[in-house]
């Protein structure tokens, strides 16, 4: 990572403010494979625009991922939704994979909600089931923090990941749906699916779910002080655990079938993600912004720094 990656994210956040008409956002949601259909259940966006116009985002090459983003007010939470993501396996560098995270935090987001499609490894998981990610095994062999120390004002590259997936946000998600299971997500580079032998190894290593995304984004978001919630949709049982082969169409189809449940879940979680004190501050800022002229060209995104609710320093990216 270079300081250029952080200044590129600042520029994208300024464009996000202009295109959305919102000087700041509170939370960002990334919709993974199969999750796009859930977006409509979240309500009517106040703005919809292409991520390509923000700069720094790649054109998605994966069916089920789009380059569009939406800005919505869900309860009192101003949310930006990315309707697709950039994957390592598309051939992009790690900085491109996490550019959305750095942009979102630079745009003011203190909460990041990552969703993905995953193969179920843990016994008892079934297709169509959302599962909270409690921890991960990053088996991509990569880190968004590789390289020189981040520029002055940003957190150390030696970022603490002991509570990468926020216990507070997981508890909140379980309040919305007490039936939610949780598990450890193994992130592999892909794009091929795993062999049955690899799945046996992952299970022995403590993995409950397997997929090709999320871990690098979560690390980048946490490095910037955001709280991270991640939810997998089990779109298939992992290789060797049932008698059918794996394919991407099945993954997208499982998402489509679960869209109403996933949208309903996100719709219940998002209005409550800001800690009470921050929700009040966000409401006050929104009404102040409404009475002035929002997002003029050159108007810097607000919420660029401050204290995250858990005491981590929150930095613009
Ligand atoms: N393996 C890896 N990635 C995936 C899977 C899987 O079985 N299902 C959905 N994404």
Image (cartoon, rainbow, N blue to C red):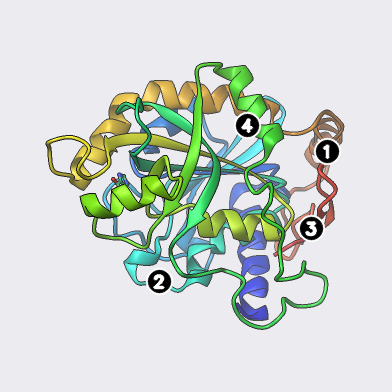
Residue 252 appears in view: yes
Give the residue at mark 2.
92
Give the residue at mark 4.
170
Q: Secondary structure at mark 3?
A: loop
Q: Is the residue marked 4 within 8 Å of ligand 1, measured from its CB?
A: no
Q: Secondary structure at mark 1?
A: loop
Q: CA distance from mark 2 to mark 1?
A: 41 Å
Residue 96 in percent (x, y) is at 49, 68
Residue that appears at 65% across and 47% down: 21
Give the residue at mark 3.
304
Q: Quadrant of the C terminus?
A: bottom right
Q: CA distance from mark 4 to mark 1?
A: 35 Å
Give the residue at mark 1.
291
Q: Earlier in the sequence, mark 2 or mark 1?
A: 2
Q: Local crowd at mark 2 within 10 Å, few (<14), some, or many (≥20)?
A: few
> Splitting the image into 4 quarters, where does residue 249 fall?
top left
> Splitting the image into 4 quarters, where does residue 310 fall?
top right
Q: Does 181 appear above or below 144? A: above
Give the camera-side residue of 211 and 17.
Answer: 211
Compared across the picture, whether 30 is left or right of 26 comes to left
Q: CA distance from mark 2 to mark 4?
A: 30 Å
Residue 145 in percent (x, y) is at 62, 71
Q: Earlier in the sequence, mark 3 or mark 2?
A: 2
């Amino acid at each position: 990572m270079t300081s250029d990656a952080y200044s590129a994210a600042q520029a994208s956040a300024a464009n996000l403010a202009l295109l959305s008409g919102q000087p700041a956002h509170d939370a960002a949601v990334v919709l993974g494979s199969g999750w796009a259909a859930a977006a409509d259940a979240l309500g009517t966006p106040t703005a919809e625009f292409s991520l390509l116009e923000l700069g720094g985002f790649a054109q998605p090459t994966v069916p089920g991922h789009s380059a569009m983003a939406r800005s919505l007010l869900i309860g009192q939470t101003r949310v930006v939704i990315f309707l697709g993501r950039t994957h390592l396996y598309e051939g992009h560098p790690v900085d491109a994979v996490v550019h959305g995270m750095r942009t979102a935090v630079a745009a003011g987001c203190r909460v990041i909600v990552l969703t993905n499609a995953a193969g179920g490894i843990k016994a008892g998981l079934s297709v169509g089931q959302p599962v909270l990610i409690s921890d991960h095994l990053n088996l991509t062999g990569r880190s968004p923090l590789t390289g020189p120390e981040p520029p002055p004002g940003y957190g150390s590259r030696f970022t603490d990941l002991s509570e990468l997936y926020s216990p507070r946000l997981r508890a909140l998600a379980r309040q919305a749906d007490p039936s939610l299971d949780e598990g450890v997500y193994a992130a592999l580079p892909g794009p091929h699916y795993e062999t049955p032998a690899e799945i046996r190894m992952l299970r022995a290593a403590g993995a409950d779910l397997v997929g090709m995304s999320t871990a690098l984004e979560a690390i980048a978001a946490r490095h910037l002080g955001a709280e991270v919630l991640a939810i997998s949709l089990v779109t298939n049982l992992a290789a060797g655990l049932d008698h059918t082969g794996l394919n991407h169409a099945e993954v997208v189809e499982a998402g489509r079938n679960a869209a109403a449940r996933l949208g309903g879940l996100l719709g219940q979680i998002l209005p409550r993600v800001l800690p009470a004190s921050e929700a009040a501050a966000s409401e006050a800022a929104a009404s102040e912004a409404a009475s002035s002229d929002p997002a003029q060209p050159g108007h810097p995104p607000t919420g660029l720094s401050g204290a995250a609710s858990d005491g981590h320093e929150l930095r613009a990216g």
